[in-house]
Image (tube, rainbow, N blue to C red):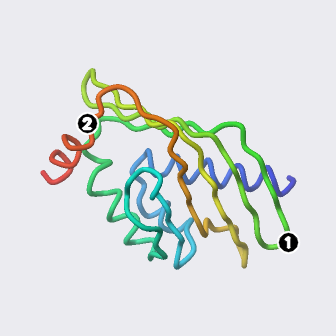
Amino acid sequence: MNQEVQIANIVGRFFDAVDGRNWDQATSMMSDPIHIDYSSFGAGDPTDSRPIDVVHGWQSILPGFDHTHHQLGNMRFDVNGDRAFVEAYVTATHVIGAEIWTVVGSYEIGLSRTKDWLISSLRFLFKYQTGATALPEEASRRAKT
């Protein structure tokens, strides 16, 4: 299997783990530290974080949705030795009951390899959102209970 296919599978499994709330798997797929940048979506300054801290942040909201689905496409790869960079479109759908909030953008995903490929950076580039934009507040409330 070529490296691009391996990397695409890792990225896909990572987002599957997040959507499936498989926090241990998601944590194990990130380097320590991991560089996180959601600043284009108003989530503060980029940070270098421990994977467990990233997951704790996701746990404060994602379980409050009935379903989430991150669909990645148009993946482009740049592999150079033990470093890789993936650019991918993303449509993230978030559902509570019959209400849907959709966020569209792209990810710039860095990976590094020692033994296995690990995600070393996630940068989200926001394009637009549509639907029930108040759902994140409801999901946060639901995730606390």
Asked whether the residues under the numbered discs 1 and 2 touch, taking CB atoms below 8 Å apart as contact, a structural biologist would say no
Above or below, 69 against 117 in this view is above
Q: Amino acid at mark 1?
A: Gly
The 10 Å Cα crowd at callout 1, few under 14, some 14 to 19, many 20 or more, is few
Reading the image, the residue beneath label 1 is 81
Mark count? 2
Q: Please name the residue that numbered disc 2 is placed on.
A: 135
Q: Identify the residue at horizontal 64%, vertical 68% (top origin).
A: 118
Circle 2 Cα neighbour tier, 10 Å, few/some/many (<14 / 14–19 / ≥20): some
- In-front residue for pair 28/4: 4
> Where's residue 77, x and y in %?
79, 52
Quadrant of the image occupied by residue 72: top right
Residue 145 is tagged as none
Along the horizontal axis of the image, is 134 left or right of 23?
left
Which element is circle 2 on?
A: helix
Question: Extreme left residue here?
Answer: 145
Using the rendered view, name the quadrant where residue 49 is placed: bottom left
Q: Is residue 30 left or right of residue 87?
A: left
Query: If you read the primary sequence from the N terminus, does the residue marked by circle 1 or circle 2 appear first?
Result: 1
Q: Where in the figure is residue 40, as x and y percent of width and height? A: 47, 53
Does dot 1 land on a helix, a strand or a loop? loop
Q: Residue at x 49, y 51 (%)?
A: 17
Q: Is residue 111 above or below residue 22?
A: below
> Looking at the image, is mark 1 or mark 2 nearer the viewer?
2
The residues bearing labels 1 and 2 have C-alpha atoms spaced at a distance of 42 Å
Residue 120 against residue 103 in the figure, above or below: below
Question: Identity of the amino acid at label 2?
Answer: Leu
The percent coordinates of residue 93 (x first, y second) are: 43, 33
Q: Position of residue 139 (x, y in %)?
A: 23, 43
Residue appearing at x 71%, y 54% in the figure: 86
